[in-house]
Image: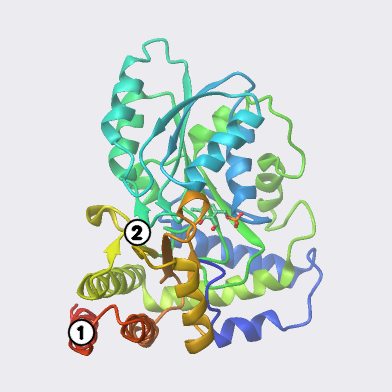
Amino acid sequence: MIPGPTPVPEKVLQALSKHPIGHRSKEFQELVESTTRNLQWLHQTKNDVLTITGSGTAAMEAGIINTLSKGDKVICGENGKFGERWVKVAMEYGLDVIKIASKWGTPLNPEEFKKILGEDIQKEIKAVILTHSETSTGVINDLKTISSYIQEHKTALSIVDCVTSLGACNVPIDEWKLDIVASGSQKGYMIPPGLSFIAVSQKAWNAAEKSNLPKFYLNLKSYKKSLLSNSNPYTPAVNLVFALDESLKMMKEEGLHNIFLRHKKHKLAISNSIKALKLKLFADEKYLSPSITAIETGELDAEEFRKTIKNKYDILLAGGQDHLKGKIFRVGHLGYVNDRDIITVITAISNTLLDLGKITSQEVGEALVTVSKNLESN
Ligand SMILES: Cc1ncc(COP(=O)(O)O)c(C=O)c1O
């Protein structure tokens, strides 16, 4: 139960094991046509959704280098490890970064974006780069509000990392007018790592005409041109596309509304039972990510705690990153996760705390009742 790679359904594993076919064949073109159509459905957009063979970082980097030019002024939101990564990428490409930071565990403040964008009378800010669901802390940022402020600015683009929000909660790209949205296969998509996806608006394509940052493999114009004939510019990870086709069909069968509801229910079941166990949530409770819950362990070493759960229950939990190592552990509940997984992980956490003498058996009982009640709701 880590926030990616996430579990892969049997049907998808079977699709993966097929013999690869030629990527210039008619069969593969049909596959590209159907996955692209279903990706647009999942992204709630009429914009182009391009598939890149590469991880989520490739899609984010592509978003930055295809739309911007050296020296461009950009705002980067930073309230965790991934926000920090986009600051590094932007600086590596010589962009002029204005950082809007917030303490790890707290959300970005949309009003700070409004203020800086509102003061930009000369329209020097070319893009706002941010992470929707911050996997390192379990915080979801208020993308809808921030995007509305970007709309008021008019010329700046939004470049958003939706790696752990897409396929887990509502990200209506057209309604929120998002320009670049990046995501990765090993998360809500329920397939192994190796593919990433990027939705590109017309405003972003217009910006691409002026962009002078170096690019070759990640030049999105090549992907767009190939897509006109349902093809790829380079050899794609053919078997991952088989898997994608299957997982998107599964997602369509479940329906967007039900997928979002399931993630919300699991988030609440975990966060409420964690509180019943007298542990503290690391993230601001009003901004809990639907995909991942970060939990503080107080005087307990979170790494030892994770090790015990792995050895005793064979459940892998994620650790804290950077200064949070040993202080928090993170439960991933993204993608192919069902109620049984949630009950099992809470039971394992409860029993481990009981063994350590940190809680009573009555408190274990309360946590298990809490998890069941939350799972029964909706
Ligand atoms: C929010 C977020 N952004 C970006 C990434 C990077 O994706 P990848 O490791 O697929 O490059 C991750 C991976 O965990 C993530 O959670």
The dot on residue 132 is none
Q: List x then y, in percent, for residue 227.
A: 66, 52
Quarter of the rendering occupied by the C terminus: bottom left
Whether residue 122 is situated above or below residue 155 in the rendered picture: above
What residue is rendered at 79% in x and 54% in y? 234
User: Whereabouts is ligand 1, in terms of quadrant?
Assistant: bottom right
Q: Quick one: 263 or 253, which is closer to the camera?
A: 263
Judge: label 1 CB < 8 Å from ligand 1.
Answer: no
Residue visible at 24% across and 75% down in the picture: 277
Most extreme residue toward the top, as rendered?
122
Which residue, given by chain and number where applicable, does mark 1 sit on?
Answer: 376
Instruction: Name the foreground residue: 231 vs 18.
Output: 18
Q: CA distance from mark 1 to mark 2?
A: 20 Å
**Residue at (54%, 39%) from the top-left corner?**
86
Q: Disc count in the image?
A: 2
Report x, y in % for residue 218: 70, 43
The three-letter amino acid code for the residue at tag 1 is Glu
- Between disc 1 and disc 2, whose residue precedes? 2
The answer to whether 234 appears left or right of 306 in the picture is right
Does residue 188 appear in this view? no
Q: Residues within 10 Å of mark 1 (few under 14, many from 20)?
A: few
Q: Relative to 18, say whether 191 is above or below.
A: above
**Secondary element type, mark 1:** helix
Residue 242 percent across, percent down from the top left: 66, 74
124 displayed left or right of 338: right
Q: Which residue is mark 2?
A: 289
Q: How is the image coloured?
A: rainbow
Q: Residues within 10 Å of mark 2 (few under 14, many from 20)?
A: many
Compared across the picture, whether 139 is left or right of 53 comes to: left
Q: Secondary structure at mark 2?
A: loop
Going by the numbered disc 2, the residue's amino acid type is: Ser
